[in-house]
Image (cartoon, rainbow, N blue to C red):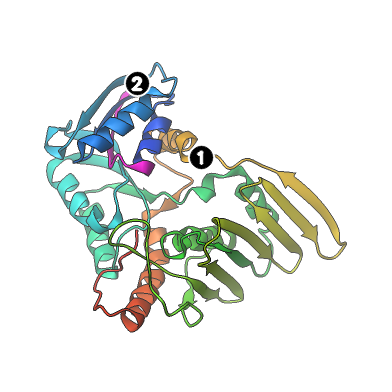
Amino acid sequence: MQLYHTLLVGAGQLGSRHLQALALSESDISITVVDPFEQSLFVAKERFEQIDNSKNINAINFYTSLDQVEKNIDLCIVATNADCRLSILKNIVRTLKVKNILFEKVLFQSEGQLDEAEALLLKNNINAWVNCPRRMQPIYHKLKNLLINENYIELEVRGNTWGLACNAIHMIDLWAYLMNNTDYKLDTKSLLPQIFDSKRANFKELGGTLKGTSGDNKILLNCDMNDVPVSIFHSIKTPNFDIKIDEHKGKCEIIYINSQHSEIIDFNIIYQSNLTNAASEKILNCGISDLTSFSDSVSLHRPFLRAVLNFLNRHDNQNYTLCPIT
């Protein structure tokens, strides 16, 4: 069986979950983890060792620099914050030969960075995807098949302190997946004028309501900033269906509008520590992925970054050239 070389860049909270999933690989792989912080590598190693590792892990190494890494990489997962991601991509293509890359979101922090990254991937013949994993969740596969012939799809997401700025692209990606379209416009008029500090240092958060349209399709993302526990609820409306989704409870209620018949679907959200292995298997063995292609994600990021950057520059006492979200 072929041995695949995998590289994980970024061993923080999410990176360590990617690593736990890679530990379950059904293909023969070697794993290299790179992070400049020894403490992050230590935590990632601990979490890796918590997993009943697959016998297919040929080797695992933890380094603080890309200069120490095997030069030929079959799959690289970039799980860093967005503010350093372009410089890391430049370093990756300068020092390594990589076939496939899986990026975390927010992808980059400006349209210019999107363009620069796109050119680098094209020049180096690298296939790339973006980790918006609702596309891999069975419940959303079911809903996409159910809604495939609907004339329009309205997605509404409401909740409290769920991270509108850092997570909106996940919801926009889900909307695009369900309606099979990446062309849309955003309206920031109903966002709160106050700019909030993110729980991550040097990044910003937003509250209020973000609205989008794509023909007859609509999206509404609402985030209250009250001092109460995090909550988030999804609803989908179409000409024939009214759907309510509670991912935390694993409940999906589907109301058939014409008959008023309803059904409840119980489901489990698959965590990242059990997703990345499935995504990597498909990429390594078939060269495809259920995740968002880089080009489609660029199309989804452009209106979002443009709208948020303009909003921040109108309401914050800064002159941002890069969107301070991750």
What residue is drawn where x is 44% and y is 26%? 24
Give the vertical position of 149 relative to 42 (above or below).
Answer: below
Q: In which quarter of the image is the N terminus?
A: top left
Report if residue 105 lies within the magenta region: no
Disc sitting over residue 99 in the figure: none
Q: Which one is nearer the viewer's eye here, 265 or 324?
A: 324
What residue is drawn where x is 42% and y is 20%? 54
Residue type, mark 1 in image: Tyr
**Mark 2: which secondary structure?**
strand
Q: Name the residue under label 1.
A: 271
Image coordinates of residue 320 in percent, x first then y, are: 25, 74
Q: Mark 2 points at which residue?
A: 57
**Left or right for 187, reference 48:** right
What residue is drawn where x is 37% and y is 23%? 49
**Left or right for 192, reference 305:** right
**Left or right for 254, reference 56:** right
Image coordinates of residue 89 in percent, x first then y, are: 21, 50
Residue type, mark 2 in image: Ile
**Left or right for 14, reference 10:** right
The single residue placed furthest to the top in the displayed view is 55
What residue is drawn where x is 45% and y is 61%? 169
Question: Which contiguous range is marked in magenta?
Answer: 1-14
Q: Which of marks 1 and 2 is nearer the N terminus?
A: 2
Q: Which one is nearer the viewer's eye here, 206 or 139?
A: 206
Q: Are marks 1 and 2 in contact (CB under 8 Å)?
A: no
Q: How crowded is mark 2: few (under 14 residues within 10 Å), some or many (20 or more)?
A: some
Q: Residues within 10 Å of mark 1 (few under 14, many from 20)?
A: few
Q: From the image, state whether disc 1 or disc 2 is nearer to you.
A: 1
Q: How far apart are marks 1 and 2 (CA)?
A: 21 Å
Q: Which one is nearer the viewer's eye here, 98 or 270?
A: 270
